Image (tube, rainbow, N blue to C red):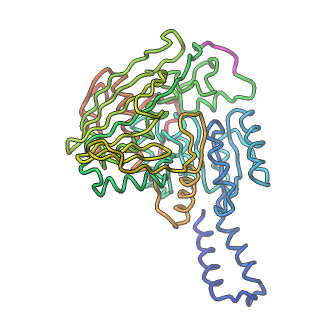
Amino acid sequence: MSSNRRNFIKKVTAGAAGVAVGGSALGMSARSYGRIIGANDRLGVAIIGLGRRLGAYYEPIALKSNNVELIYLCDVMKSQYEKALINFSKHIDYKPLTEVDIRKVIDDPKVDVIFNATPDHWHTPGSIMAMKGGKHVYVEKPCSHNMNENELLVKAMKKYNKVVQMGNQQRSSDHTIEIINEIHNGIIGTPYKAVAFYTSKRGEVPVQKKVPVPSGLDWDLFQGPAPRRDYTYETWDYNWHWYGWDYGTAEAGNNGTHELDVARWALNVQFPLHVNVEAAKRHFINDGWEMYDTMDVTFRFHGDKIIKWDCKSRNGYDTYGGGRGTIIYGSEGAVFVDRGKYILYDRDGKKVKDSKSASNEAGNALGGGGDMTTTHVNNFFDAIRGKAKLNAPIDDAAVSMAMVHYSNIAWRTGRDFDIDSDNGKIYDREAMKLWSREYEPGWEPKL
C-alpha cells in the first residue's frame, strides 16, 4: 500500500471519528464513509505460481474481513492459470487478470502484495524483484534456494522496508503457539533435544528424457534464474523437486523446513555450531530421482542442545506415530507436536495433556492448505496494515532455513562441518563453495 493511500486512510478515519451516524457536513452517511475507508485500505494481491499451494489461498483472499482484491493470477503454464480462474470463481465474485510474466505483474502499481508460490529457484529472486517494485511478499517455503539467497532476502526486506513472511504456517497454529510458550516457561524443565521428522511413501520418478516443451509452457520463464537447458519429461510438474539442484532443495527444503522451524523455535536456538549428516538414495535406485530420499541430520547448538532431522521420503514406516511432526525432550518431560495437536508427557512418560486441536491443516498430502494457513495469511495482511506483528518474519525464518541448506551442503560435499553461530558462515572451504549457485547470466538476484 502506498504512503499516499495510508495518509488518506488516516485523514479520513480522523474525520469520520466525529461524524454522527445520521450524516456529515459532506452529505455522506457513516456507511458511505465506511465504504471510502474500505476501498482505500484494500490491498491489491497477485499470486505467482498456481500449483499445489493455490488452494491454501482461496479462503484468506475471499474473506471480506481481509479487504483484499485478487488482481492477478500468474503462472508460466497456461493450463495452470486457466484452472486457477475456474477454482477461484467458486470463492470470489469477480474475475482477476491472468499473466505469464512475473515482471509485468510487479510493474503494475495496483498490486500491493505478491504471493510467491513458484518453484524454489524463483523464491528469492522473485521476492527481491517484488520488493524492489514496492510490494510486500508472502513467500512459500523454502524462502531461499541457498545460503547466499538467504542473506540477500533479509537484506532486501530491510533495504526496501517491506513486510515479508515465509509460509511456515505452523507459526500461526494456536495449539503450537500455546505449547511452545509453555515449553519456554519451563513446563518440561530445560528443553535439550528436538527430533523433527517427515515420513512419506513417494513412488518412482521418471528418468529424465528430452522431449518437446509442453504446449502452453513458457520454459524460458520457468527456468528464470536457473542455467538454461533442454526440457525433460515432467520437469515442470512437481518433479523439478528431484531433478538436480537447478530448481529444488530436496526433501529438506520441500518439507523439512516446517518441522526444523518448530524444533528451533521450541529450543529457542539460533545458528548451530556443527552439522553431521547421513543420507543417501535408498529406494528405486534406477529411477530419475537425483537427490537423497533418506536423511538423518544432527545439529549441535550452544547449551548442549541438539536438533535431529529424520527424513524418509519413500519409506512409509511410522516411526513416531504420525507422518510429520516434532518431539521435544526436556529435563522434566517431553512434548509431541504436529499440525493437529500436541501431547504433553511427564518425565515418567505419562500423558499429562492432549490438546486435541481442531485444526484441519493438510499434513502429507500434496498441496493442501487449511485453517492454519488462513490464520497465517491473515496475520500477514494485518502486519501490512500495522495491526499485528508477523508470526514468521523473514529474518527469523531465514535462520531456520539455514538448517535446510546446511543439511544439503553436508550431503553434497560428504563432509561434516562447524559453523560460526554468530553469523551462520561455514568453517569449511569446500562447503562454502556451495554457499551460492550458478545463475543464468543477467538473472542474478541483486538488491
Q: In which quarter of the image is residue 22?
A: bottom right
- Range covered by the magenta-colored residues: 209-213
Relative depth, front residue between 24 and 197 = 197
Vertical relation: 61 (above or below) 362: below
Q: Is residue 155 visible?
A: no
Q: Main secondary structure of the magenta part?
A: loop
Vertical relation: 386 (above or below) 346: below
Q: Which residue lies furthest to the top in this view?
A: 286
Q: How many marks?
A: 0
Find out whether residue 354 is within the magenta segment. no
Q: Is residue 204 visible?
A: yes
Vertical relation: 280 (above or below) 103: above
Give me the residue at 33% from left, 22% from top.
278
**Residue 315: x and y, percent?**
47, 21
Relative depth, front residue between 363 and 410 = 363
Q: Quadrant of residue 24?
A: bottom right
Left/right of residue 418 with respect to residue 324 in the rendered view:
left
